[in-house]
Amino acid sequence: MEIPTIDEIKQQILAEKAKYSSLDEADSTSKTALFNLWAYVVAVVHYVLYQFFQLFVSEVDEKIRTQKAFNEYWYREKALEFRYGHPLVKNGYIAEYLDDGYTEQEIADSKVVKRAAVIEREVNSRTILFIKMATENGDGELEPLNDDQLTSLESYYRTIKTAGTKVVIQSDQPDDLRLTVDFYYDPLVLTESGARIDGTDNTPVQSAIRNYLKNLPFNGEFSVSELEDILQGLEGCSEREAIIKSAESSFGVVINWQPIESFVIAESGYMTISDANLTINFIAKTVTT
């Protein structure tokens, strides 16, 4: 539901007032007239109530979406709730974590799964839930969970999952990305190596590419056109001319580059690009006015 503006609510109040002849004397057009101020205050109160109600509905919808066992969202939330090193305690038919004996910091530190996505696939006529996961290193960069954490996670899911559901845990090294970019730069802003002349950033184009990858939703689409649009909007890009000439991705230990025509979803759920795999051809082009 679209929330009406304060002015729209106020006009509704004034329209209602006009129905009562006993209020005809309150007809001043001044913004400081008492009835005008009263209508404005009531409109603001109603506007805030609208916002509270919309927030309430949103929260209820989210709870329904995530708490309906045992859908994909439920399995994803359980991955994020996993606490490495903490035992599950049976409570009837439910196994759950207890907070007693742990500080808030200890609980936060035990939640090693920082990103998760659930994909349902048919394999040999059997439905399997593949759960992709990643943790974070000290710099906040995504990386795979270690073997001990994965072993603990597999035991955790065997305990909480529904009977008959096949769950496969995945936590892999990021997919590699390889790009070749033609970037037409304004010589008044950037140097021939792509550094800003004012000295504020030596690698603005490279940083924009890596920031795009870092900010992608986990298991989200990498889009060639979306990244191209970001590069074209960079200060120093001459007349929005930045072209991704080629884009390829590779998953797994053995490098096997696959062309990206328009978009791709990383097999691991996330991507990275090394300096060796990023080729940027900086081409000078003076901006015309």
Image (spheres, rainbow, N blue to C red):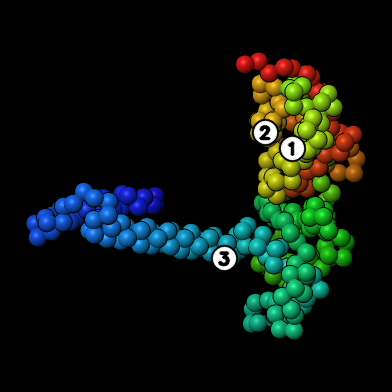
Q: Where residue 191 sits: x, y (%)?
A: 82, 26
- Along the viewing direction, whichever of 263 and 103 lies nearer the viewer: 103
Which residue occupies 24% across, 50% down?
30
> Where on the picture, by quarter, is residue 22?
bottom left
Q: CA distance from mark 3 to mark 1?
A: 37 Å
What's the residue type where badge 3 is placed?
A: Gln
Name which residue lies at 32% across and 49% down.
7
Q: Are marks 2 and 1 in contact (CB under 8 Å)?
A: yes
Q: Which mark is residue 67?
A: 3
Label whose residue precedes the other's in the sequence (2 or 1): 1
Residue 86 on image: x %, y %: 78, 76
Residue carrying label 2: 230
Query: At label 2, which amino acid type do we have?
Result: Ile
Nearer the N terminus, badge 3 or badge 2? 3
Q: Mark 1 Cα within 10 Å, few/some/many (few <14, many 20+)? A: some
Residue 136: quarter of image:
bottom right
Residue 267 horizontal side relative to residue 55, left or right: right
For the residue labelled by badge 1, is the local secondary structure a helix, a strand or a loop?
A: helix
The residue that label 1 is drawn on is: 208
Element carrying mark 2: helix
Kind of residue sitting beneath label 1: Ala
**Which is more foreground, mark 3 or mark 1?**
1
Report the front residue among 215 and 163: 215
Q: CA distance from mark 2 to mark 1?
A: 8 Å
- The residue sitting at 77% across, 21% down in the picture is 187
In the rendered image, the residue lying farthest to the bottom is 101
